[in-house]
């Protein structure tokens, strides 16, 4: 391997003459890899190869009698990958999306197609793709992290570097960007600046700098940033000011001011500091009354846009609708007294956090039900700061089944050793207002269930019961690897009750949802097994064999089709829902029926010893 020391001694069998102590070994054809040499006295090949490739050379050994032996030797020099990502230290902003692509030089072999990249712990909020080496995410915690990055190729060769990621909070200028309107020749007071400090204080000497351009500004203080306006010319002007902290992080603001003729009506608008210069959709309405003023006390009206971002209603309330830049306008006067003031802010997405409430516990007044292996299951509780629903999945699918909404069904007896703990992960994809929930280790948690006695078997249906389905007790029942949910359904009688003697048909419908991939896309399908049995139509009381027309098929067979079976064999959970209903229009009214074959025999009130076989 390139750069790896090589020591390759030669072996020999001495003939009748001795081998000279010096100069017996030579290379007579071909060349050694660059960086390697042959010791003419010992025959050993040593050194550090520098160039990959396949090499062939002939080694010659000459004894004291001049007899020679030769051997053609081959050597392959391989090179491992080299990570070239630079620099090795990064300073990034908290709560801002950051991506670091991986760069490398391929060696002799390609990188592994999957899992080529490995990383030690990353700052919270960042994740790394093991196939591409890209680090990305929104960091959520300030701090310094050393990350060891290793890449591996198909030859098992590796390269490792250490990068340092420092998550900081930069400073931010919070002064409104629109400084307002000034009368020509006036002498306004200096405008103070406001700053939100980040992870570090501002630099001690002159943290403020500015680019004034043609704006009528006499100065921006390099000490505190205060702005001295000198309204000596008419027009609308812009200029910039920048602050710098001890981390070397900066923030630059672009300000606007307008100078109008003396005696003009001047409209001013000052939006709340909570939304300028940026805000989220955590609060979506702000009253504007009183925020805009007229120097001549004229009525002020408001408008806002873009329409997809914000608008102002007839009650002068600003409503935020979506992400982007919202421009708010205050206007007063007409004709020569017409005056307009504008102020803008940016609506950004909000990050999400999750509070995982362990089963049986209460946090902030929210309680989570106990975790048990009852067939009724239980529901996980993990409220999001966004109010959006969490999406759950089981990471221990042989222990518990978890629906996306958090409904948990324990698949085994929790009293068995090692069967009372299931690992669950919660995610949230976000929406137009919120970023996805960060993929943090804390989003994966264990739930521990206690064992409860199994529920009683569903009661046997009888002919004189109320018009409901069979079995009478709904719930989820275990049968081997299957989870079968029985739902009872009430039946509405649409017409007058018949005078027939025996009960009517029983209908059972089993639905099995599964997923297949068609042309690269997942398609949801449902297999349906339906069966109707029992007495299919009313009969005459004079029928001598009427008593024999009772239930003859006590089970509902339902075999998985090929697609559904493949879905199950691939390790997916298959959930079956069977709805059983009974047509009650033909009630049983007589207990005894005398006939040629049924003389003296009791007509049983039992409709069916219900049984469900799934296979």
Image (cartoon, grey):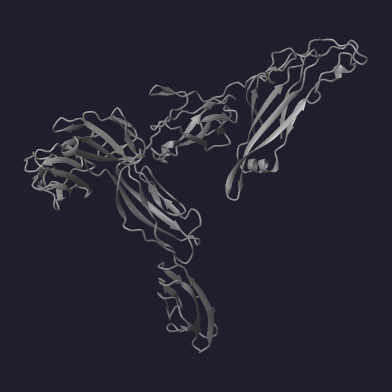
222 lies left or right of 485: left
Is residue 9 among the parts visible in the rendering? Answer: no
Q: Residue at x 30, y 53 (%)?
A: 89
Q: Residue at x 70, y 23 (%)?
A: 581
420 lies left or right of 172: right
Q: Position of residue 262 (x, y in %)?
A: 9, 40
Q: Nearer the viewer, residue 21 or 305?
A: 305
- The image quarter containing residue 278 is top left
Q: Nearer the viewer, residue 485 or 513?
A: 513
145 lies left or right of 129: left
- The image quarter containing residue 324 is top left
- Quarter of the image with the N terminus in it: bottom left
Taking 23 as reference, is 482 above or below it? above
- Quarter of the image with the C terminus in it: top right
Q: Residue furthest bottom?
A: 66
- The image quarter containing residue 354 is top left
Is residue 610 among the parts visible in the rendering? Answer: yes
Q: Position of residue 135 (x, y in %)?
A: 39, 50
Q: Position of residue 304 (x, y in %)?
A: 29, 37
Q: Residue furthest right?
A: 596
Taking 542 as reference, is 517 above or below it? below
Q: Position of residue 15 (x, y in %)?
A: 55, 83
């Amino acid at each position: 391997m390139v750069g790896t020391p090589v020591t390759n001694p030669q072996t020999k069998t001495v003939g009748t003459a001795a081998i000279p102590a010096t100069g017996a070994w030579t290379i007579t054809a071909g060349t050694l890899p660059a960086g390697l040499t042959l010791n003419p006295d010992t025959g050993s090949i040593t050194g550090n190869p520098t160039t990959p490739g396949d090499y062939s050379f002939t080694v010659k050994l000459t004894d004291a009698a001049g007899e020679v032996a030769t051997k053609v030797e081959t050597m392959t020099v391989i090179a491992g990958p080299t990570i070239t990502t630079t620099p090795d230290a990064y300073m990034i902003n908290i709560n801002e999306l950051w991506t670091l692509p991986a760069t490398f030089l391929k060696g002799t072999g390609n990188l592994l197609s999957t899992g080529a990249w490995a990383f030690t712990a990353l700052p919270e909020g960042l994740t790394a793709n093991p196939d591409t080496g890209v680090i990305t995410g929104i960091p959520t915690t300030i701090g310094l992290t050393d990350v060891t990055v290793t890449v591996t190729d198909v030859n098992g060769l590796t390269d490792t570097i250490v990068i340092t990621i420092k998550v900081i909070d930069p400073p931010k200028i919070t002064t409104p960007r629109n400084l307002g309107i000034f009368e020509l020749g006036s002498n306004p007071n200096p405008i103070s600046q406001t700053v939100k400090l980040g992870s570090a204080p501002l630099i001690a000497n002159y943290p403020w700098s500015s680019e004034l351009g043609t704006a009528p500004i006499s100065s921006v203080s390099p000490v505190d940033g205060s702005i001295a306006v000198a309204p000596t010319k008419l027009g609308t002007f812009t200029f910039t000011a920048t602050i710098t902290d001890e981390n070397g992080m900066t923030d630059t603001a672009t300000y606007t001011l307008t100078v109008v003729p003396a005696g003009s009506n001047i409209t001013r608008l000052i939006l709340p500091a909570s939304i300028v210069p940026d805000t989220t959709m955590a609060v979506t309405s702000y009253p504007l009354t009183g925020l805009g003023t007229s120097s001549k006390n004229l009525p002020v009206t408001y408008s806002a846009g873009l329409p997809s971002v914000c608008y102002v209603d007839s009650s002068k309330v600003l409503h935020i609708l979506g992400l982007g830049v919202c421009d708010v306008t205050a206007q007063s006067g007409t004709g020569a007294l017409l005056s307009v003031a504008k102020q803008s802010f940016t609506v950004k997405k909000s990050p999400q956090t999750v509070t995982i409430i362990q089963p049986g516990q209460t946090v902030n007044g929210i309680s989570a039900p106990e975790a048990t292996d009852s067939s009724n299951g239980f529901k996980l509780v993990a409220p999001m700061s966004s109010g959006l629903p969490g999406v759950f999945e089981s990471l221990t699918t042989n222990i518990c089944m978890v629906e996306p909404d958090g409904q948990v069904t324990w698949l085994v007896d929790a009293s068995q050793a090692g069967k009372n703990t299931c690992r669950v992960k919660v995610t949230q994809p976000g929406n137009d207002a919120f970023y996805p929930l960060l993929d943090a280790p804390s989003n994966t948690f264990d739930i521990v269930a206690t064992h409860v006695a199994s529920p009683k078997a569903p009661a046997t249906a009888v002919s004189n019961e109320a018009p409901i389905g069979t079995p009478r007790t709904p719930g989820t029942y275990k049968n081997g690897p299957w989870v079968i949910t029985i739902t009872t359904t009430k039946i509405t009688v649409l017409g007058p009750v018949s005078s027939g003697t025996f009960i009517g048909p029983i209908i059972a419908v089993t639905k099995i949802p599964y997923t297949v991939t068609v042309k690269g896309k997942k398609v949801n399908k449902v297999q349906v097994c339906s069966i109707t049995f029992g007495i299919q139509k009313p009969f005459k009381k004079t029928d001598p064999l009427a008593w024999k027309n009772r239930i003859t098929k006590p089970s509902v067979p339902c075999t998985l089709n090929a697609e559904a079976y493949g879905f199950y064999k691939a390790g997916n959970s298959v959930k079956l829902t069977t709805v059983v209903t009974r047509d009650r229009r033909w009630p049983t009214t007589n207990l005894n029926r005398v006939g040629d074959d049924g003389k003296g025999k009791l007509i049983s009130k039992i409709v069916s010893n219900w049984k469900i076989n799934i296979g």
